[in-house]
Amino acid sequence: MMLKNITFTGTRISDQLKEILKEIALGLRVGDRIPSEDDIARQFKVSKVTVRAALGALEAEGLVERRRGVFGGNFVAKPSSDKMGEVVMNYYRMGDVTPEDLVEFRAILEPTLAGLAAERWTDKELETLKGTIDQFEKDLREGNLNSRAVALEFHYVLADMCHNALTSHVMRALSVVFAKVLDLFPWVMDDARIDLAYSKQLYECFLRRDGDGARRIMTSHFNTLKGIVERWRRTQAVKDENLEDKP
């Protein structure tokens, strides 16, 4: 691969080099090798330290994968939804995104996903969805309230059933954030049973390929979840007041 001769001016050289290498990486296929550090340094007349800084920044963005060993080097990485999730998680940790924001976001998105999934599923996907419901029901029957991950998996499978790559990536990217937020809310058996009931109702809509019905049920499900968040928020407010009253 030929690298262009470019003169660096103004901002930090490593930042400019990073943008150039990003353009190169985006023009390649996943798994393609990027020119070696020596080749890049020689072509752009910069130090290897600068090259490593630029490649390190691209690695942090998930665009470049560094491999060690005889067949090592720098390669174009497969896109990962993890980076998107990390950004949202940072917003959440800093308080810029609240639990209410995340629930509202899902309430906007997921009824539409449910409607599409009801109309687009394949036999194999429906079987996978049924498997998550069966596991969820088994866990609750055994009194296992640690099955929230299974309940969340239902929603990720549903997103995959839409056959829209972006919705799948978004839902998977946000999975860690969703799980973190839901951990705030004590999950009592009554709430879990309601969640299971919604999942079963959605499954029945899917069997009929009833997109409108699936949208209505998912909307109702998130109205219930909003109520759980409001209940948690009131409980937190009472706890805060009690702490303030203590001498």
Image (cartoon, rainbow, N blue to C red):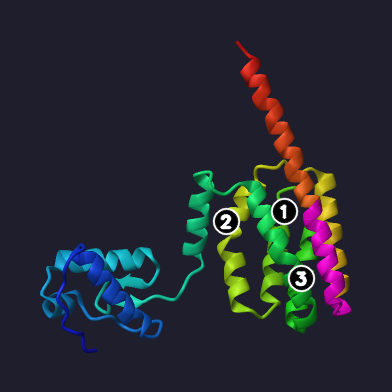
Taking depth in this image into account, of 56 and 73 the one nearest to the observer is 56
Instruction: Tell me the residue at 73%/44% (across/down).
Output: 229
Q: Position of residue 32 (x, y in %)?
A: 34, 84
Pointer 3 residue:
114
Pointer 2 residue:
176
Residue numbers of the magenta segment: 206-223
Q: Are marks 2 and 1 in contact (CB under 8 Å)?
A: no
In three-dimensional space, the C-alpha distance between marks 3 and 2, rounded to whole angstroms, equals: 21 Å
In the figure, is residue 68 to the left or right of 96? left
Check disc 3: other Cα within 10 Å, few if <14, some if 14-19, many if 20+: many
Instruction: Tell me the residue at 14%/76% (across/down).
Output: 7
Taking depth in this image into account, of 102 and 202 the one nearest to the observer is 102
Q: Position of residue 96 (x, y in %)?
A: 53, 47
Q: Is residue 141 visible?
A: no
Instruction: Indicate which disc, 2 or 1, sits on the residue closer to the N terminus.
Output: 1
Q: Position of residue 84 (x, y in %)?
A: 50, 63
Viewport quadrant of the C terminus? top right
